Image: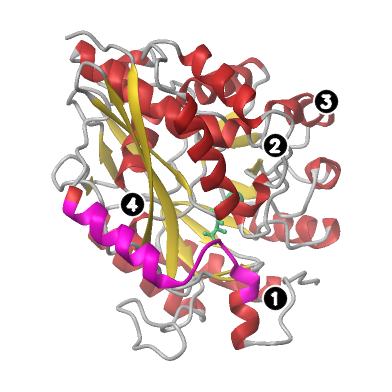
Amino acid sequence: MSAGRVSRVSVTPVAFRDPPLLNVVGVHQPYVLRAIVQVHTDSGLVGLGETYADLAHLERLGAVAASLPGTDVFDVNGLRRVVVETLGASTGGAGASFGGMLEVSSAVDTVAAPFEVALLDLQGKALGRPVSDLLGGAVRDHVPYSAYLFYKWAGHPGHDDDSWGEGRTPEQMVAQARRMISDYGFTAIKLKGGVYEPRHEIETVEALAAAFPGHALRIDPNGAWTVETSIKVADRLAGALEYLEDPTPGIEGMAEVAKHTDLPLATNMCVIAFEHLKPAVAADAVQVVLSDHHLWGGLRRSALLGGICETFGMGLSMHSNSHLGVSLAAMTHLAAATPNLTYACDTHYPWKTEEVVKPGALEFRDGGVAVPTGAGLGVELDEDALAALHEQYVTCGQRGREDTAYMRTIEPGFSPNTARW
Ligand code: GKR
Ligand code: MG
């Protein structure tokens, strides 16, 4: 079938429920906002993409959506040109999508990403081949993911407890891990830290290591610790962790920590764009980069990141924000077709109770997801679910990711945790 040209593009913001997961900047709000992109062609195909949905991002997505008709579905470089021309000089403020955790200097990559994924979905549908084939071919047919643990409240204030209950003590965190592992078979565990005193978080990791021997462990405090604290944590947990993720902020800080430990340091915070690779490599600041196609400009540019990591002998893992099934499909195809992505990828998927794709194509089993074999991304939108989650977006009252502001409605004196030791 001919792929044709883009005839129409829609961008639909949706909201899905999220538990009160804690992190260094605060707590997850009751809903996660995402945008579902549908790119229609004059040959009758529809390609899918998924991305963030704060207001500044939605406005940019809308402007690109209006400029895209006429683009050849195989012209991914043409898409980028459209994005650059549409955004012009106004590319600032892209950090709004990350709840205050990241400074993103240009919105070009975050805006281009969902459209690029949709074009690849269309190419695959036209050719009758999965997206992983378009990325060079799957080198694995099952992509491992990690059990992503969060300290959490038992429920959102004013609401019933959720089914996970409180996650605060090491025992509660072991129970959280046990449920995720028994439900999905994960063999890697990531603990989101930066919430409590480092000593408490270390004890949690030690309890996890004792409860799940042989599982690969990581902790990620999102840059909450000083260099000194990070070095102490690295010393104490050296035998327990496969990598230590973003213990301290910035390339310089990470480089200083790296000088004092053999434990690989990983990041999705200080290397978040191609321009950060040169200084990070020069300083030997990080040994593992977490890719993320939503942030790095799409699947092909993420594959390029994989090549750069290979060139410089750095490992590759994958970062996740809260997401739905269109993103999970894209992440799975990318990981399947990236030979040096050898760590289990992150996913927030187990925390989610609502979905926009039809069931069946993406199942977590044996610690991961089988790579969809259908054409394109291999997932189909459930139009009724999309409409319901869009309605939820309209009525939920949230218009951005505001972990700190939400936390302050509950703990007025809260300021992002910079725990010292
Ligand atoms: O969902 O609270 C969260 C995470 O902290 C997320 O925002 C981060 O981007 O998953 C993340 C990470 O730093 O690895
Ligand atoms: Mg991280």
Question: Could you tell which of marks 1 and 3 lies nearer the N-terminus?
Answer: 1
In the rendered structure, find residue 91 and report the number of the disc placed on it. 2
Q: Secondary structure at mark 3?
A: helix
Residue 86 covered by magenta stretch: no
The crowd level at tag 3 (other Cα within 10 Å; few <14, some 14-19, many 20+) is few
- Whether 271 is drawn above or below 305: the answer is below
For disc 3, the marked residue is 282
Q: Disc 1 marks which amino acid?
A: Glu
Estimate how packed mark 2 is, as few (under 14), some (14 to 19) or many (20 or more) residues with alpha carbons within 10 Å.
some
**Amino acid carrying mark 3 in the image:** Ala
Taking the image as shown, residue 183 lies to the left or right of residue 186, namely left
Chain part drawn in magenta: 384-405
Regarding residue 120, the answer to whether it shows in the image is: yes
Q: Kindly identify the residue that appears in the image at 74 percent across and 38 percent down.
A: 105
Q: Is mark 2 within 8 Å of ligand 1?
A: no
Residue 197: numbered disc? 1
Distance from the alpha carbon under mark 3 to that under mark 2: 27 Å
